[in-house]
Amino acid sequence: MNIQSKYHGEIEIQQEDVITFPKGIPAFENENEFTVLPLQEGTPFSILQSVHSTNLAFIIGEVFSIFPDYDIELSQNAIETLELDDAKNAVVYCIMTVKEPFIESTANLKAPIIINSIKKIGKQVVLNQSNYETKHRLEKSPAFTQEG
Amino acid sequence: MLVLTRKIKEAIMIGDDIEISITAIEGDQVKLAISAPKHIDIHRKEIYLAIQQENKEAASGLANLDNLFKPKSDK
């Protein structure tokens, strides 16, 4: 199928590229289908594009590439929503709030996007018990401190 | 809005399967125990609002990404 993407215009995706978010994500509760698009090779960043709303797209980062010390424990609720029976099927992203210059961007570590890569189910999981912040500065990442 | 008065160790039921009980009251703090089906998400409201706000901000993004990973130009 073809979709209109925010950053790359019309693109073709396959049905298996569609990730279902049963409850949407906070503030966008009615957006139930997204797809992950590449952003730039050699970076841990991708785009989480709504399948139905062209203008809704997030820059997301592979958390463990950016913050290797990141440590989360999923609630039973999250595990069931995601139908996760094996932790290795979980892909963990953080939504980036992008600033210019890019190093001043922040990552939402309080509420990561978890995707079951086998069943193509996604959820933004709010970590109630953690001290992670919604605006964790990218410059604290060991992967980026050497730049700029 | 329904307003109920409860004492410590008393509870309320919401529907058949959500129970909220008062486990401790200390000064201006109340400790609640919530028992609900696993598909119900429970959040502290200010945290949920912060996540919504952050998502809105993140979604506004940039007009284009072309310059995102380019090295800084010397001005």
Image (spheres, rainbow, N blue to C red):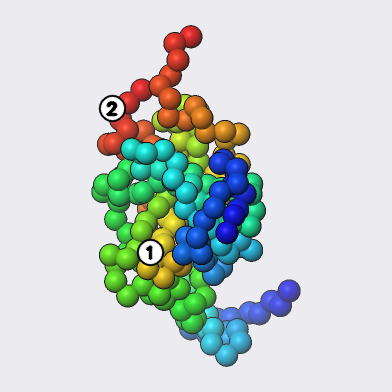
Q: Is residue B49 visible?
A: no
Q: Nearer the viewer, mark 1 or mark 2?
A: 1
CB under 8 Å between discs 1 and 2? no
- Residue lying farthest bottom? B16
Q: Is residue B61 left or right of residue A101?
A: right
Q: Give residue A146's mark.
A: 2
Q: Tell me residue A113's x, y (percent).
A: 44, 57
- Residue lying farthest right? B1
User: Relative to the observer, which residue lies in front, A42 or B3?
Assistant: A42
Judge whether B35 appears above or below A101 on screen.
below
SS category of the residue bearing label 1: loop
Quarter of the image that includes the C terminus of chain A: top left
| Amino acid type for the residue under numbered disc 2 | Gln
For marks 1 and 2, give the CA distance: 32 Å
Q: Is residue A85 left or right of residue B16?
A: left
Q: Which residue is mark 1?
A: A117
Q: Tell me residue A25's x, y (percent).
A: 55, 60
Judge whether A34 appears above or below B69 on screen.
below
Determine the residue positioned at 36% across, 59% down.
A91
Q: Tell me residue B11's x, y (percent).
A: 54, 84
Whether discs 1 and 2 lie on one chain: the answer is yes
Q: In which quadrant of the rendered view does residue A43 lie? A: top left
